[in-house]
Image (cartoon, grey):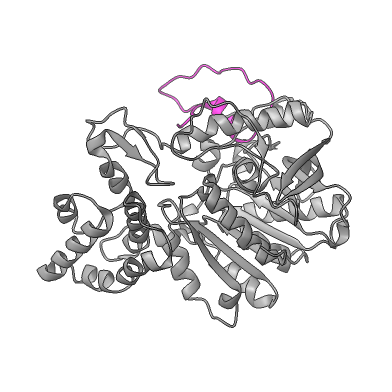
Amino acid sequence: MHRRGVLAAALAVGVGAAVPALAQDPKSDPPKLDLAKIDLPKFPADASVKQVTRVAGKTLNYTATVGVIPVRDEKGKVVAEVVFTAYVLDGANRPNRPITFAFNGGPGAASVYLNLGAIGPKRLQFGAQGDSPSDPPTLTDNSATWLDFTDLVFIDPVGTGFSRSLVPLDETKKRFFGVKEDVAYLSRVVYDWLLKNQRMASPKYVVGESYGGLRAPAVGHYLQRTLGVAPAGIVMVSPVIDYRARGHTDLSPLSYMITLPSMAAAKYEREGRPLNAETLAEVEAYARGEFVTDMLKGQSDPAAVNRIVERVTRYTGLDPALVRRMGGRIDTQTFLRELYRDQGRIASIYDANVTAYDPFPWSQTKRAGDPILDSIVASTTTAMVDFTTRVVGWKVDGRYNALSDEVNDNWANRSQAESVEDLRQALAADPKLKVLIAHGYGDLSCPFFASRLIVDQMPREAGAARTTLALYPGGHMFYSRSGSMGSFRGDVMRLYGAGG
């Protein structure tokens, strides 16, 4: 899925103009593209359209707006343009009505997934078994939208959606493609949107999915501490809160420990067992107990190795010979590759029970893309571009990046990224702040057990008591399942004090 070359680098920073292909000497470094010398077409003025949706027996009349928030440097020069999509309920008492700002992750993902998949007023089906990238991009009323209890603003970071940098790539990377820089400018975008739309007095919420789940508490804390805009709540959807827990080493069982419950959940679902706290209690207790102590004993204790092999085989459903060869240390890619190998299929890291045919079934290593990721980019891109340009009438000249490999590839210091400190500090500073962390049981890209362990380490009085971990059947995009999406909506309504 990697798109390389100079043109790709230009697209990564959101260049909207046509850029001629540049001939390259394969033996030399590719020429650098100076974006400052490219005459970009101007973005159009903000555009709006009146729409209607129905939820919980109510008809909601609202205004959908697509527009731009400029990002300025220290001297006031515009260095980037961030595109937003906002849904505001008509006739509401705006000063008292909640407003929610939503981000996806990646890094490199536009906000289309939360927008059209989970919480916006219109919905596109994607991310489940059988969904196809060539399915018609048909938007329908979203029965689980949050619009009846909060207005919604979806923000596309620089290099995603239509958002673009106006400076050269080297400067773009320094200004936008780092953990702290990302939080700082996106927090300012939130502030500027509130100021532009006279919504400073509204109760404010931040929601983020995946890497956006790492963004959400960091943006919330930055707004609270630096910009003087305190959020009332933070919602983290399938978040990765601390990348440092994901590293594989022979001495640390942590990465294997946090994925084992999700592997077991995938097996239980295939067996038709209900996914709930009771069903997962045994494997969670094993993962944080005997599994850890036996793994640390290593090969010095053959009995410990035998116990690990027996239990890991039971929980994953993998071939016991494979489990023994790996000493019970089953990494995610091996699990996904081997789970359906005898059927000629590969499983998705985002939901281990969503599969696709393996185009290289005899290959020793996986050579195909991810079944979910490969199916959602086309459908979401088509649907969002059609909605933005035809339905809303924001006539933009440029490419839409639903998921940018270039932003992801150019991101700095992600392996050390974490927002646990921001989460703890934001909760400790505001005794009324509430947090919801939502996961799908079968997600192996951002396993729920990592969040469980993080929350369990937090002081109860300083925030853990106001932090709820909610788990649902499904994977990373658990909202692709109607039952899980409905349950998620109910949990979010309780966080907002809107019932549910």
Q: Residue at x 71, y 56 (%)?
A: 187
- Kindly report the secondary structure that dominates the magenta region of the rendered protein: loop
Query: Which x, y percent locates residue 23?
Result: 51, 16
- Taking the image as drawn, is residue 98 in sight? yes
Q: Is residue 10 above or below residue 20?
A: below
Q: Residue 37 at x, y = what percent? A: 70, 27
Q: How many circles with numbers are drawn on the protein? A: 0
Front residue of 118/463: it is: 118
Which residue is at the front of the view, 439 or 46? 439
Q: Residue at position x 80%, y 50% from top? A: 193
The residue lying toward the viewer, choosing from 116 and 370, is 116
Task: Determine the image quadrant of residue 94.
Answer: bottom right
Q: Position of residue 76 (x, y in %)?
A: 81, 47
Name the image quarter holding the C terminus: bottom right
Q: Is residue 148 left or right of residue 125?
A: right
Q: Is residue 438 left or right of residue 288?
A: right
Q: Which stretch is magenta?
A: 1-30
Residue 463 sits in which quadrant? bottom right
Q: Quadrant of the N terminus?
A: top left
Where does residue 356 sit, x and y in percent of width and height?
37, 34
Q: Is residue 11 left or right of residue 356?
A: right
Q: Is residue 498 above or below residue 182?
A: below
Q: Residue at x 43, y 63 (%)?
A: 276
For the point 63% across and 47% down, the residue is 176
Residue reaching furthest bottom?
461
